[in-house]
Image (tube, rainbow, N blue to C red):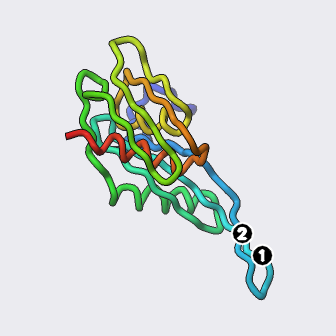
């Protein structure tokens, strides 16, 4: 007997809902050279957010990709920051700098959506913004641009 999608038994086997949206920014192969030779590991950069103003960014390293992602998510949950959201956009213009990365974030009118580069777009979306204009200057380093974006978002009073 085959089970249909409307069976009452199927309710037991549904996946639990996650409390945070998880976005993978990058997975990189990193090596360390020692006396035994090269040791290959994976580095995962993750952004998590609840869509209501809480967001975090962290990296995790491990021998396996899945473990690196799990480490990054677990550590990011410990480092959540709260950002200010007004009418699904940022309250006012802000600029921030982290190392050589400079970012500029502007409020936008309803229906504009998020106009931003990859890492900035994922951070703004997971934080809960829907209408934002953003621009990056200087560095193209993904992690530095992501940290500069978080610095800009956390600077709102």
Quadrant containing the C terminus is top left
Most foreground residue, 57 or 144: 144
Q: Secondary structure at mark 2?
A: strand
Residue 52 location (% of width, % of height): 28, 35
Name the residue furthest right: 37
For image coordinates 45% across by 29% down, the residue present is 134
For image coordinates 38% across by 45% down, the residue present is 150
The Cα atoms of the two marked residues, 2 and 1, are separated by: 6 Å
Label 2: how many Cα within 10 Å (few below 14, some 14–19, many 20+):
few
Most foreground residue, 66 or 108: 108
For image coordinates 38% across by 41% down, the residue present is 17
Earlier in the chain: of badge 2 and badge 1, it is 2
Residue 15 location (% of width, % of height): 44, 42
Please report contact status of discs 2 and 1: CB closer than 8 Å, yes or no: yes
In the rendered structure, find residue 2 and report the number of the disc placed on it. none
Residue 58 location (% of width, % of height): 46, 56
Taking the image as drawn, is residue 150 in sight? Answer: yes
Residue topped by disc 2: 31
Label 1: how many Cα within 10 Å (few below 14, some 14–19, many 20+):
few
In the rendered structure, find residue 38 and report the number of the disc placed on it. 1
Report which quarter residue 41 is drawn in. Answer: bottom right
Most foreground residue, 2 or 40: 40
Name the residue furthest bottom: 35
């Amino acid at each position: 007997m085959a089970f249909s999608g409307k069976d009452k038994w199927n309710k037991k086997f549904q996946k639990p809902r996650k409390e945070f949206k998880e976005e993978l920014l990058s997975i990189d192969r990193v090596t360390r050279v020692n006396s035994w030779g090269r040791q290959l590991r994976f580095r995962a950069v993750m952004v998590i957010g609840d869509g209501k103003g809480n967001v975090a960014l962290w990296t995790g390293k491990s021998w396996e990709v899945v473990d690196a992602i799990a480490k990054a998510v677990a550590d990011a949950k410990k480092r959540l920051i709260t950002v200010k959201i007004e009418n699904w956009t940022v309250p006012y213009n802000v600029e921030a700098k982290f190392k050589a990365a400079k970012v500029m974030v502007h409020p936008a009118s309803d229906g504009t959506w998020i106009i931003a580069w990859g890492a900035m777009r994922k951070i703004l979306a997971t934080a809960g913004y829907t209408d934002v204009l953003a621009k990056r200057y200087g560095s193209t380093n993904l992690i530095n641009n992501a940290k500069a974006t978080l610095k800009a978002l956390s600077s709102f009073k």
